[in-house]
């Protein structure tokens, strides 16, 4: 496989993108966008991207924090922000004004990190990130080795939410996989044209508890949404570099993803 770096224009900036193409010679390959967790496109995400290329996909892992945010949203800083966020009630997290007050009350060295961390998790930022991902899928469709009719997405946690949001803004997306990500706005579900697969953890009630609502919205829209909940697994169970890694669930999830994408993208 061949690993390259691309820069994709979007919303007045450039998105850094890790691109891996398979060695297998075909006129056109299916393609998949691998959407990172809140930690950015770290070693785990790059490994998953290569795994998809090994299965015959042109695989792209964009860094949605490209630009000024990348300087602050390093993995170390994000860990510090997560530790602070653990003390914040859910109703405060959902309120941008209250989150701004919380960030302003933090020690001066962590304050800028908290401000950016809070901003990228707000619904308005998610709308913008979905547009960035749309730029990535359009970039992939323009590559000579990609079949433009066979493009899908896979996202994890923060990226799982965005995989679903991408499906609401890209009518040409064929398939979207959500790993333990929040639902897209249910009012946007009728805009989806892709089939979707959701993989969730039983010990992640804040996210998993909302899945039936998405399933019902997809059913009403006449769309395919298959999902599976892994008993005994916690959030981020697929990430083998994190404490919540649940090998049994991760080992089962990977062939489910490949089977789903194989059917929807004709891989």
Image: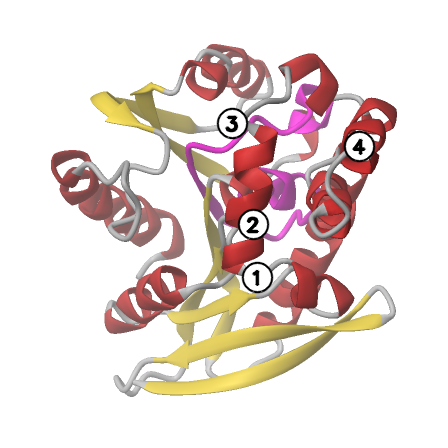
Q: What label does residue 78 carry, if any?
A: 2
Residue placed most toward the observer, 27 or 226: 226
Q: Nearer the viewer, mark 2 or mark 3?
A: 2
- Mark 1 or mark 3, which has the lower sequence index? 1
Instruction: Kindly indicate whether the residue at mark 4 contacts the one at mark 2 (C-beta within 8 angstroms).
Output: no
Is 152 inside the magenta-drawn segment? Answer: no
Q: Which residue is mark 3?
A: 223
Q: Which residue is mark 1?
A: 74
Q: Position of residue 168 (x, y in %)?
A: 67, 39
Q: Which residue is mark 4?
A: 105
- Mark 4: give few (<14), some (14-19) or many (20+) Cα within 10 Å: few
Q: Label 4: state its secondary structure.
A: loop
Residue 117 makes an appearance in the image: yes
Q: Nearer the viewer, mark 3 or mark 4?
A: 4
Q: Label 2: state its secondary structure.
A: helix
- Mark 3 or mark 4, which has the lower sequence index? 4
Q: Position of residue 61 (x, y in %)?
A: 50, 66
Instruction: Say above or below: 208 vs 67.
Output: above
Q: Position of residue 136 (x, y in %)?
A: 63, 66
């Amino acid at each position: 496989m061949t690993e390259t770096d691309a820069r994709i224009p979007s919303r007045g900036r450039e998105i850094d993108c890790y691109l891996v193409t398979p060695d297998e010679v075909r006129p056109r390959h299916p393609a998949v966008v691998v959407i990172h967790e809140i930690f950015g496109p770290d070693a785990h995400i790059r490994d998953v991207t290569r795994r998809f290329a090994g299965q015959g996909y042109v695989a792209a892992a964009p860094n949605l924090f490209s630009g000024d945010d990348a300087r602050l949203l390093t993995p170390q800083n994000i860990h510090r922000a997560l530790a602070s966020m653990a003390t914040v009630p859910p109703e405060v997290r959902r309120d941008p004004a209250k989150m701004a007050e919380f960030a302003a009350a933090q020690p001066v060295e962590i304050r800028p990190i908290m401000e950016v961390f809070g901003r990228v998790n707000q619904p308005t930022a998610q709308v913008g990130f979905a547009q960035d991902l749309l730029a990535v899928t359009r970039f992939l469709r323009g590559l000579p080795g990609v079949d433009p009719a066979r493009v899908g997405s896979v996202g994890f946690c923060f990226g799982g939410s965005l995989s679903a949001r991408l499906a609401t803004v890209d009518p040409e997306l064929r398939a979207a996989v959500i790993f333990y990500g929040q639902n897209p706005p249910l009012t946007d579900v009728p805009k989806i044209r892709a089939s979707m697969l959701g993989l969730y953890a039983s010990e992640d009630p804040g996210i998993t508890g909302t899945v039936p609502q998405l399933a019902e919205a997809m059913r009403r829209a006449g769309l395919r949404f298959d999902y599976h909940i892994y008993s005994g697994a916690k959030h981020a169970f697929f990430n083998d570099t994190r404490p919540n890694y649940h090998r049994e669930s991760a080992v089962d999830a990977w062939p489910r993803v490949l089977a789903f994408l194989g059917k929807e993208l004709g891989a």
